[in-house]
Image: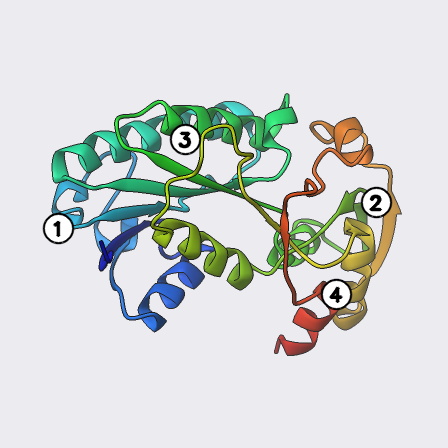
Amino acid sequence: MSITKFAVAGATGRLGRHVVDVLAERGHRVVPMSRAAGVDVITGEGLAEALTGVEVIIDVASWHSSDQEAATEFFRTSARNLQEAGQKAGVAQIAVASIIGVDKATAGFVAAKKVHEQLLLSGPLPARILRAAQFHEFVGQLLDWQQGDVAYIPALPTQLVACRTAAETLVDLALDPDAPAPGRPIPEIAGPRKETMSEAAQLLGARRGIKVVGVDGSGMPDAEIAANGGFLPSPHAKLAGPSFQEWLDTQP
């Protein structure tokens, strides 16, 4: 079966924009689902209409803060609505972006994503999950959150990946004609090299005239797990460029 029509939840988000671009470039019909387009995955407004004739949902809708309770409630509601509306519309499956190390998380946003995965996997529609490393684009957000000429960024290990690379891998997974074999690990995508978040932030900070100081990250949810490499890719992960520096060189 050649899949032709996709719906993308969170289509205007950081990852969603790239998913829409990749699908369109590959010749698929795309229904972008976002509040701006009159589709709300939380209230359910416009969902039934948007999913008419759709074969696969790609869910990259996200919550805007790290508050665990609010994020969990968002993902709980969106998973239920997408599964229910998708089943009624005759959708074949859902593909969703998650986070590397989510299975180890105990707190914060990543713990909310763990609940999200579990809920999508327990729904009536088959769900495929891609766990991604933190995005290159997130580094700028970390700097934006801190006012002033000095930014204190956790020196926690990461393997940053480009949003575009994650989007391409997620679309590949959604299009794969073979169902994931039982017992196989959940696929992962990460960047080509290990670095710390503060090192990446220093590269960006140099462009913005911001001094970046690496700190130990205590006070962050699951900082100890992160410090021990808990959010680094598994041996089975796909690693793909560009590196953070290469990506930064292409940014305006």
Residue 13 at x, y = what percent? 43, 54
The residue shown at (36%, 62%) is 20
Which residue is label 1 attached to?
Answer: 53
Disc 3 secondary structure class: helix
Q: Spatial distance from mark 2 to mark 4, Cα to Cα?
A: 15 Å
For marks 4 and 1, give the CA distance.
Answer: 43 Å
Percent x, y of residue 129: 46, 39
Q: Secondary structure at mark 1?
A: loop
Q: Secondary structure at mark 2?
A: loop
Quarter location, residue 48: top left
* 4 or 1: mark nearer the eye: 1
Q: Nearer the viewer, residue 31 or 68?
A: 31
The residue under label 4 is which amino acid type?
Leu
Tell me the kind of residue under disc 1. Answer: Gly
Residue where numbered disc 2 is placed: 155
Q: Which numbered disc, 2 or 1, marks the residue that appears first in the sequence?
A: 1
Query: Label 4, label 3: how many angstroms apart (C-alpha)?
Result: 31 Å
Type of the residue with mark 3: Phe
Q: Is residue 242 left or right of residue 11?
A: right
For the residues marked 1 and 3, what is the alpha-carbon distance in whole angstroms?
Answer: 24 Å
- Structural distance between the alpha carbons of marks 2 and 1: 47 Å
Nearer the observer, disc 4 or disc 3? Answer: 3
Disc 2 to disc 3, how far (Cα)? 29 Å
In-front residue for pair 178/233:
178
Q: For mark 4, what is the residue?
A: 204
The x and y percentages for residue 121 are 39, 27
- Give the residue number, with chain letter if any, for mark 3: 75
Q: Amino acid at mark 2?
A: Ala
Q: Earlier in the sequence, mark 1 or mark 3?
A: 1
**In the image: residue 64, left or right of residue 175:** right
Label 3 crowd (10 A; few <14 / some 14-19 / many >=20): many
